[in-house]
Image (cartoon, helix red, strand yellow):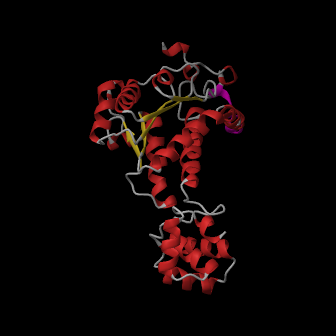
Amino acid sequence: MNLENLTTEKRNEKTMLLDTLSTREILELMNEEDQKVPLVIKKQIPRIEEAVTEVIKHFNINGRLIYMGAGTSGRLGVLDAAECVPTFGTDPKMVQGIIAGGMSAMTVAVEGAEDSKLLGKQDLVKLNLTSNDVVVGIAASGRTPYVVGALDYADEVGAVTISISCNDNAIISKHAQIPIEVEVGSEVLTGSTRLKSGTAQKLVLNMISTAAMIGIGKVYKNLMVDVKPTNEKLIERAKRIIMQATDCSELDAVRAFNQAKQDVKVAIIMILTNLSRDEAIKSLKDANGFVRQVVK
């Protein structure tokens, strides 16, 4: 597929005189275009649901969620993966973001990296990819060779393959078991897929990782109860989560938090059930990490 045929590369008729507009006019136009993104994503919810279902299934057999992409798409995958650790208390290996050219490509473009199918395969070989894993190939253009190579190798291994693109009938869709296509239209700045396309990808990645974490018990009510209190801000957040989950006083929350050795889930169960720390830990394990199943 030639670049001129890609929606993400076409010129936006509304912004032909972009350089003549006032700052206010530019901002209003960008905001107007951005509002199209969630409406397009809504049409893809059935496919996103399929993706989340597979991620949950494979998390439950100790599989990993691996994002693969180049440029902006790769950076967004790395970002979503990195944020799962503090938000959901995951092992860093559980959700990983791999960018063409390695981590140095997060800030400096690596020449030719995205053009290599072999590099996509090699990066997954280094991770010892197995059939328990899920690979999500991300490419706004939907044609990045690096992503195609990664998806093809993942398919050979027997891993689940998912693609996220911002063009209809994308090439990578043909290499994925679950293709997600969010065609948000031409960009305000021609070809700058860090704009609407990047926003669309970020929203879809948010949906996949958050819904999957809820599906394996990392959330109680709407609270991130597996948060790891690794700094002062997160310690305070952990205490507040305990208070919100149990309607207890700050004093009781701090006491339970300390007794639970800073495990938020255990502290919540101790308060709501009057179980000891050891009993709360066992009950949580028996419930596969779901607080609600213990306190119901």
118 vs 254: above or below? above
List x then y, in percent, for residue 87: 52, 59
Residue 278 shows up from this direction:
yes
Q: Nearer the viewer, residue 46 or 40?
A: 46
Instruction: Please state the horizontal and vertical placement of residue 6, each as a whole percent of the image.
Output: 55, 18
Question: On the rendered structure, is 233 left or right of 39?
Answer: left
Comparing 149 with 78, the one in front is 149
The magenta stretch spans which residues?
18-27
Residue visible at 62% across and 26% down in the picture: 183
The vertical placement of 146 against 270, above or below, is: above
Q: Residue at x 62, y 63 (%)?
A: 220
Asked whether, in this view, residue 97 is left or right of residue 203, the answer is left
- Classified by dominant secondary structure, the portion drawn in magenta counts as helix
All told, the count of numbered labels is 0
Is residue 107 in sight in this rendering? no
Percent across and percent down for residue 217 are 55, 59
| Vertical arrangement, residue 84 with respect to residue 191, above or below | below
Vertical relation: 30 (above or below) 18: below
Q: List the single residue furthest toward the front.
A: 286
